[in-house]
Amino acid sequence: MKKVEIFTDGACKGNPGPGGWGAILRYGTYEKEISGGESSTTNNRMEITAVLEALKLLKEKCIVTVYSDSQYVCNSINLGWMKKWKSNNWMKNKKEPALNVDLWKQMDELLSKHEVSFEWVKGHDGHPENERCDRLAVSACLKFK
């Protein structure tokens, strides 16, 4: 299987407000930058969307490492929160529905197609790819101002 690295970031001017996301896909020496946004969204939705849009571009089963500065995204996968929400019919507990269920359902489907691990990186700390993704996300966000 091909080994792919995906770097992601999301941005939002206001929360909710106009938002953007950016991602870099890397396979060997090949890189692809993608970005997009929405006129009214949240930062967490943009963080998830960056991962989703990158994973959607993979045409065959891959070994993927996702690098994100979103603890929400990384912990939802690494700590099993998403699996727990799914097993509880997308509820956080007996009274509270999980947030962003529409996106987590897509994530669940895409993760089943690949071998994916998530690595948290500290945001705005000089990580070159994270800084590039931040620029992509902010630029996409500003198109909605």
Image (cartoon, rainbow, N blue to C red):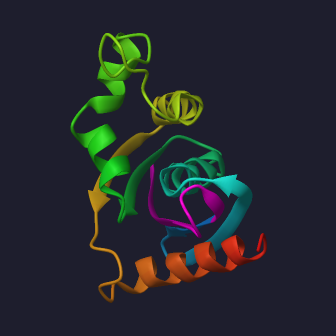
Q: Is residue 102 above or below residue 134?
A: above
Q: Residue at x 58, y 55 (%)?
A: 16
Q: Is residue 33 above or below residue 4?
A: below
The front one of 136 and 144 is 144
- Tell me: 109 left or right of 19: left
Q: Position of residue 89 (x, y in %)?
A: 43, 10
Q: Which stretch did the figure color magenta? A: 1-19
The answer to if 2 sits in the magenta stretch is yes
Q: Position of residue 108 (x, y in %)?
A: 48, 29
Q: Where is residue 104 in the image (x, y as percent from the top left)?
A: 50, 33
Q: Position of residue 71 (x, y in %)?
A: 30, 55
The front one of 88 and 15 is 15
- Tell me: 21 left or right of 39: left
Location of residue 23 by image quarter: bottom right
Location of residue 35 by image quarter: bottom right
Q: Residue at x 27, y 45 (%)?
A: 75
Q: Residue at x 52, y 53 (%)?
A: 51
Q: Is residue 109 above or below residue 38?
A: above
